[in-house]
Image (cartoon, helix red, strand yellow):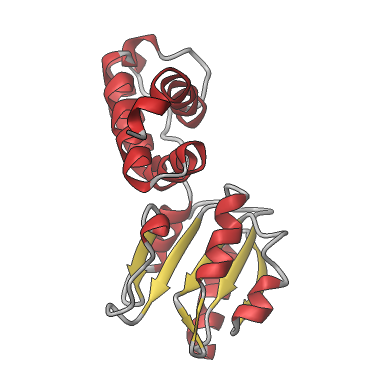
Amino acid sequence: MRNLRGLHLLIAEDEWLLASDLAKFFSDMGAIILGPVATVEQAEQHAQTAEAAILDVDLQGKYVFPIADELMSRNVPFVFFSGCDRIAIPEHLRFASSLSKSSSRTALADALCSPEPLLEPTTATVAQPTSVADDVVSLLPKLRLAARLLLDDARASDRLVELTLESALEDIDNKPAGSSTADWLNGIMRGIARARGSSLLH
C-alpha cells in the first residue's frame, strides 16, 4: 500500500459513512486527515493547510468549487468525488480528476499522487521509458494545474501540456540523472511558457 505519511489530506464529504471509510483508508496509508467535513464552510477552515484534497462536488446543497479555486491558487492537488454526473464542472477546473463514488479507493489515491517508485530494474536503460511513462500518466492532473496557473486560459494551458509532453518524448534520453519526472516536466513546461506562452493565448 502506498505511503502518504504526513500528508495533510482534506476530505470534504457529506455522507457520513463514506467520509468515515475514506478517512480510515487514507489514515491507514499515513495521511493526516483534515476533517472529514460536511460543508463548504467547514472545508474553508482547512483549505490553507491542506496538501491534497478529496472534494465531494455537492456538500449539502452547495457546490465545492470555491474550495477548489483556493486549492488551485496554492497548486494543491485535488480530486472531485461525486455521486451525480449531472453537475457540470466549471471549465477552469476541468484539469482536475473527477471520479464517481463507485470508484475504488486505490483509484482515488492514484489520482492524488504518483505511484510508488518501481524496484530498481536489472537493466536501467531498458526499464526507464516505461517508468517515466507511468510517472507522466500519474502526473497529468498536476501538469494541467501548473499549466493553468502559468497561462490562466483553459485551452492555452491544455496546449501547453501537449507541447510539454511532445518535447519530453523527443528529449527523454536526455532526462537528467537523479531528477524526478515532475521536476523535469515542470522545467520543460516553464521553458515553453516563457518562449511561446503569448502565442498560445492567441
Q: Residue at x 43, y 21 (%)?
A: 188
Q: Residue at x 36, y 77 (%)?
A: 101
x and y percent of residue 54 in the render? 51, 67
Give above or below for 47 relative to 149: below
Of residues 187 and 110, the one drawn nearer to the viewer in this rendering? 187
Left or right, 42 with respect to 53, comes to right
How many marks on residues? 0
Query: Is residue 115 in view?
Result: no
x and y percent of residue 88 in the render? 32, 72
x and y percent of residue 94 in the render? 36, 57
Give above or below for 127 relative to 10: above
Q: Which quarter shows the C terminus? A: top left
- Furthest residue in direction top, as rendered: 174
Q: Residue at x 69, y 54 (%)?
A: 6
Left or right, 156 with respect to 42, comes to left
Give above or below for 32 relative to 16: above
Query: Is residue 75 in view?
Result: yes
- Furthest residue in direction front, as rendered: 202
x and y percent of residue 150 in the render? 50, 36
Q: Residue at x 27, y 17 (%)?
A: 126
Give above or below for 195 relative to 143: above
Left or right, 5 with respect to 113, comes to right
